[in-house]
Amino acid sequence: PPGSRLARIAEHLLHQRSYYPLFPPAKGACLDLARYKEWEMPCRPDILIVPSRLATFAKEVMGGSTIVVNPGELTKGTTGGTYAVMDVHPMEREGLEKA
């Protein structure tokens, strides 16, 4: 199904708790390992936006605890591309405290 490849990649990001999709990096990769702490995810995000050239989609992953959105590319050569519009409603403080 559309989006399943990127959803799997996003799940790998979430499992590794890293914004860098492959760790350890491939041999010869131009990567500043002195800054690896900056790639770490401090917690699992509710929404993860991962723009790519793959098919656009929005999908729940990790049992529905995270929504992954691939808005695509805003421009494609000389033509227009795609983007995502999101309407996020925050939870009430009481609901957060009970969770």
Image (spheres, grey):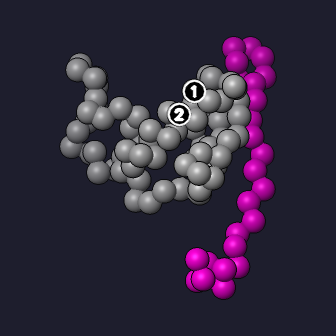
Of all residues, the one furthest to the front in this rendering is: 63
| Labels 1 & 2 near each other (Cβ < 8 A) | yes
Residue 25 location, x and y as percent? 28, 29
Quarter containing the C terminus: bottom right
> Residue 94 is drawn in which quadrant?
bottom right
Q: Is residue 35 magenta?
A: no
Residue at figure coordinates x 69%, y 25% from the top left: 1
Q: Position of residue 45 (x, y in %)?
A: 53, 56
Residue drawn at (29%, 51%) of the image: 37
Element marked by disc 1: helix
Residue 14 placement (x, y as % from top left)? 46, 46
User: For this view, does 58 lie left or right of residue 5?
Assistant: right
Query: For the point 65% across and 35% down, which residue is it?
Result: 70
- The residue that mark 1 highlights is 5
Vertical side of 41 occupied by 20: above or below? above
* Residue 8 tag number: 2
For the magenta stretch, what is the residue range? 71-99
Distance from disc 1 to disc 2, alpha carbons, whole Å, reads 5 Å
Name the residue type under label 1.
Answer: Arg
Tell me which residue sits at (62%, 30%) in the image.
Answer: 4
Residue 81 among those drawn in magenta? yes
Closer to us: 61 or 93: 61
Q: Is residue 99 left or right of residue 86?
A: left
The image quarter in which residue 52 lies: top right
Label of residue 34 in the image: none
* Element type where label 2 sits in the image: helix
- Is residue 19 positioned above or below 95 on the image? above
* Main secondary structure type of the part rendered in magenta: loop
| Kind of residue sitting beneath label 2 | Arg
| Residue 23, horizontal then vertical, whole percent | 30, 35
Report whether 63 appears left or right of 29. Answer: right
